[in-house]
Structure formats: structure tokens, C-alpha cells
Amino acid sequence: MLRFLLVRIASAIPVLIILSVVTFAIIQAPPGDYADFIRSQLMNQGGASFAQADAQAQIYRHEHGLDQPIVVQYFNWIGGILTRGDFGYSMFYNKPVADVVGERLPRTLALALVCHLFASVLGIGFGIWAATRQYSWIDSLLSGISFLGMTVPRFLMALIIVYILVFQLNVSEIGSFYSPQFGGAPWSWDKFVDLVKHVWPVVAIATFGGLAYNMRVMRGNLLDTLNAQYVETARAKGLSGGAVVMRHAVPNALHPLVMYQGVVLPYMLTGEIETAIIFALPTVGPAIVGSMAVGDVYVTATFMMVLSATLIVGNIIADMLLALLDPRVRQQGGIH
């Protein structure tokens, strides 16, 4: 297993390099940079003339290497990461990019993992429930929920919930994790309850899409598995219906869902990002949008690389889980 893990990690390195090049090039493609943002700020808020603002922008561009060719900027950025662990300096947040990522990424990952846990447990459970009651009203109801979860855009659900909370229920604390009285307070049960009150819409929306996919896939796979010959043999031996489903059918129907774990983490991250942007939570989503709007290239590039890395890590974890679950995969891949 260790050899398999090392091979997968080694094969992921070229992919990350290619992704870093493509990401950096795409981010730099639109015209303008952070120096242009400074020029507009000096003119609009500082009252400077165009000539004065442009002179200051050119000085800033030269001091921070923004006037260098894009190839030089890329190698300066990637070289700092590889040699010093330096992801660059955020011009907008006025601090190292690593600090910006360190403040926002753990919150995002925590929310994404919570959503993944709920989506997996509920989706698989509902999928088993629907498959074992095929064509019943329960199956129809759950299938309708699955259809909505896979078709309704998450940002639209977020906008609807924001409208209900703000304009119908007069909720004013939108855009934070805690109420003011709990901001710097130590952990307690009351602080945890307050956190749940603030983040439940993001968790619910991001979970809904993953739950729908898990339920749909689990239902379809389990229906196919229940008609397999070895399941019929288990029934013929006199096993109860529950034992046949849980001991023989469900483990084999889980294989495609295990492979799905390779994309579920970035899927949950993007779900959290979309809804966090609507709710203005201090996580990765608003930071990406804000940095892209002002041309803070190193923040945007680093966050995009982190999301790319989660996809690769998720696929490696999925391969390992599948190898542990299915002995045939271990034999074919030479894993011991």
C-alpha cells in the first residue's frame, strides 16, 4: 500500500505543475493588475489627477515586479513556494498569502468535511431506503428530492434563504460565524450553538447537492445489485431480507460511491464557496472573488492551486479506499 501511495503522489506532481502554469496564465490573462486598482483608488478617493495616480501606480508596479513578463512572475512565485515555502505577498490584504490562506482555508475545509459527512451518511441511507421500497411513495418522494438537489443551482438556493432570513425573518447577523458577544470568547456550548445558528444555511445548501448525488447513485447501484445471482443465492439460503441487503448487496453497491470520493471534496468546497460568497462568510470564496476583482494575483493563484490539490488528494484517497474495500483491485494493481 505504501508503494501504491508513493506512486500516486509522484504521478500527481506533473499534474500540479501543469495546473499551476494554466492557473497562473488564466488569472493573468485579463487586462489590468493591482497597480491599476491603486490608480483608480487614488483618483476616486484620493482626489489625485490621472498623471499623479498613474505615476504612483507605475512606481508600485515596478517595486512589486508587476511590470515583469508573466513568465518571470510565474517562476518567481513558484520558486518561492518550492525553495522557501513563500506563496507571495497579498497586495490587497497587505500580508503574506500564507497568512490569508491559513486564516480562511481551515474554516472552509471544516465546513466542507461536515457537509461531506452529512451528505454521505444521509445520501447512502436514503438511497438504501428508496431502493428497498422501489416504486413506493417513499421512493417517489426521495427521487424528487434527489432531482431537485442535482438541478437547482446552489447560489439560487443561497439567495432564496438570504431573502427569507433578512427580509422575512429580520435576521441581521449575516456574514459572520459568531454573534459579537461570542467573537473572542473561549469555546463553550453556547458558542457552539451560536456557530450552528450562523453556518447552518451554508452547511444545508452544500450538503443538499452531495446528498442528492449519493442517494441517486446508491439507489441505482443497489437495485442492480439486488438482482445479482449471489444475492438470490443468499435469499435461497434463508437469510432475512435485512441481512441480504446489508451484508451482501450494500457493500458491493458502495464501490462507485467510493470512487466518487475522489471528486466529492472539491465538490463540497465549491458548494461551500458558492454559498459563502452569498452569505459573505470569511472563508475561501469571498477571498477568491475579492482578490480577482482587484488583481491580487498571488492570492487567487494560491487558492486555485489549493483547490486543485484537493481534487488530486481526493482521488488518491478514493483509490486507497477502493483498494481496501475490494481485494480484486489490490490484486490487479499489485498492492500488498
Image (cartoon, rainbow, N blue to C red):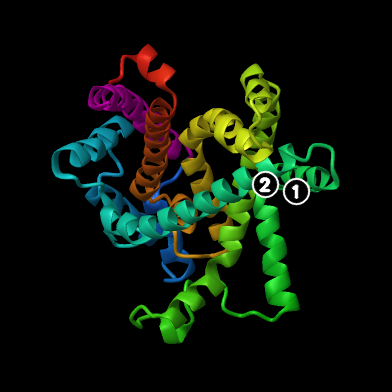
- Residue at 66% x, 37% y is 240
| Identity of the residue furthest to the left in this view | 83
> Circle 1 is placed at which residue position?
145
Where is residue 136 shown, x and y percent of the image?
A: 84, 42
SS of the residue at dot 1? helix
Q: Quadrant of residue 330?
A: top left
Q: CA distance from mark 1 to mark 2?
A: 10 Å
- Residue at 46% x, 82% y is 190
Q: Nearer the viewer, mark 1 or mark 2?
A: 2
- Is the residue 117 above or below the residue 229 in the image? below
Queried whether the magenta region covers residue 5, the answer comes back as yes
- Residue at 30% x, 62% y is 94
Q: Of 232 and 8, which appears nearest the observer? A: 232
Question: In the rendered image, which quarter contains the N terminus?
Answer: top left
Q: Which residues are magenta?
A: 1-30
Question: In the rendered image, which quarter contains the C terminus?
Answer: top left
- Residue at 25% x, 46% y is 87
Mark 2 crowdedness (10 Å alpha carbons): few <14, some 14-19, many ≥20:
many
In the picture, the disc for residue 126 is 2
